[in-house]
Image (cartoon, grey):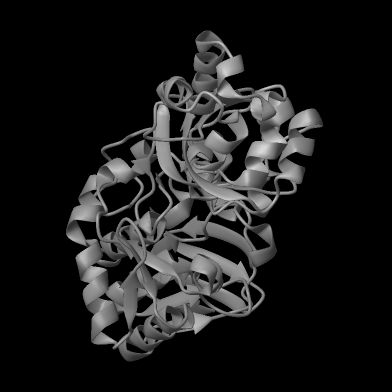
Amino acid sequence: MTNADVLIIGGGAAGLMCAITAAGRGRNVIVLEGSNRIGKKILMSGGGRCNFTNLYCEPSNFLSHNAHFCKSALSRYTQHDFIALVVRHGIAYHEKTAGQLFCDKSSKDIVAMLQNECDTAGVHIITDSEIQSVAFNEVYQVDCGSGKFTAPSLVVASGGLSIPKMGATGFGYDIARQFGLKVFETHAGLVPFTFTGALHELMENLSGISLRASVTANSTTFVEDILFTHRGLSGPAILQASSFWSPGDTIEIDLLPGIDASELLVTTKAEQPRALLRTVLAAHLARALVVELQDHLWRRRAETPLAEQSNDSLRELGRTLNRWVIKPAATEGYRTAEVTLGGVDTNELSSKTMETHRQPGLYFIGEVVDVTGHLGGFNFQWAWSSGHAAGLVV
């Protein structure tokens, strides 16, 4: 039996930040990581360069049943605090778009930084520690393949269900339920859409084409790139919209954001009556997209001069270009999802410490909690902030 002050289940972003913060206060910290190495999700994120935070991180960038819960942790350990840590370790980084910060070289730099901080603080990390049971009898008792451990404080930082090939499981939710905590239903978030039938065939034919578009799901709109794939639709705007979509819902895609397509077509007809619809649209959309959408959206009118088409029909087409309504069959699910929506009810936790109200010494941080960020480094910042909040008090 190994005793510690703090046991942390999960050696990902949130767990490691909590460990560093707690050990920095002189606490004896053990991190139990189920896989063969720490920070696996960090390593694969951002195309291997880790979008580790966002310059413009605000509470409004997060989804939760309690929109106010994240404010405390985010305000006490900000994106600027984490950036300062990155700078102190000499890691070169750059801003990509909309405040997204990436490592210049590799996400390995972030994992190495966290490992170095853990080593300096005296954190004991044990990998290949698959948890077999968790119990409480005055102290928390955790049994796993690597031994038995006890501590008065237990921090659950086991993540969500996204990307099971990386070892993701619902174990953190099981622990919450074991101690009587409410857990909201979970869903895959920041995930591509799939389609069936004619729409699937269309997407497959357009596979590889990307463009800037506006995507709306349940009155929430994102203007970023979309990507047609063999299975459906992906790209930043689609991933963002997926977190607001429910099965059976439609989504709206504006293929010409910022352009009134109806006005464009009618005005062009007046100025260039012999111009072909295909030619006009190709000035704004990929030619392959214009050709492939002929049957689906404008019924082969692309080869017809504008002068031979009524203003009403052109306006109708314009409205379709600005508001293409389609219904996804599903998402690709947790297999490719970047995050898990839902999780441990924040009403069960202290927003300042992340400790449960009904079970003293038990904490939940990171993705396992019902706080989910938008795409762009926000979920990592929640991991850093929530981990730091718990690390200050465990």
Q: Horizontal placement of 390 versus 190: left or right?
A: left
Q: Quadrant of the N terminus?
A: bottom right
Q: Residue at x 41, y 33 (%)?
A: 221
Residue 168: x percent and y percent?
62, 59
Give x and y (percent) for residue 110.
41, 79
Which residue shows up at 67% across the image and 58% down it?
A: 164
Residue in view at x 35 percent, y 44 percent: 62
Residue 159 x, y percent position in the rendering: 52, 57
Residue nearest the observer in this picture, 376 or 254: 254
Q: Nearer the viewer, residue 352 or 207?
A: 207
Q: How many numbered callouts? A: 0
Using the image, determine if residue 386 lies above or below residue 341: below
Q: Is residue 27 visible?
A: no
- Asked if residue 58 is positioned above or below residue 182 in the image, the reply reads below
Asked if residue 325 lies left or right of residue 387, the reply is right
Q: Which residue is at the front of the view, 35 or 6?
A: 35
Which quarter of the figure has residue 8? bottom left
In the image: residue 346, left or right of residue 185 = left
Split into 4 quadrants, where in the image is the C terminus? bottom left
Nearest to the observer: residue 104 or residue 146: 104
Residue 287 percent across, percent down from the top left = 63, 45
- Up the image or down, 136 lies above or below 112; here it is above
Residue 122 seen:
yes
Up the image or down, 341 lies above or below 31; here it is above
* Occupied quadrant, residue 120: bottom left
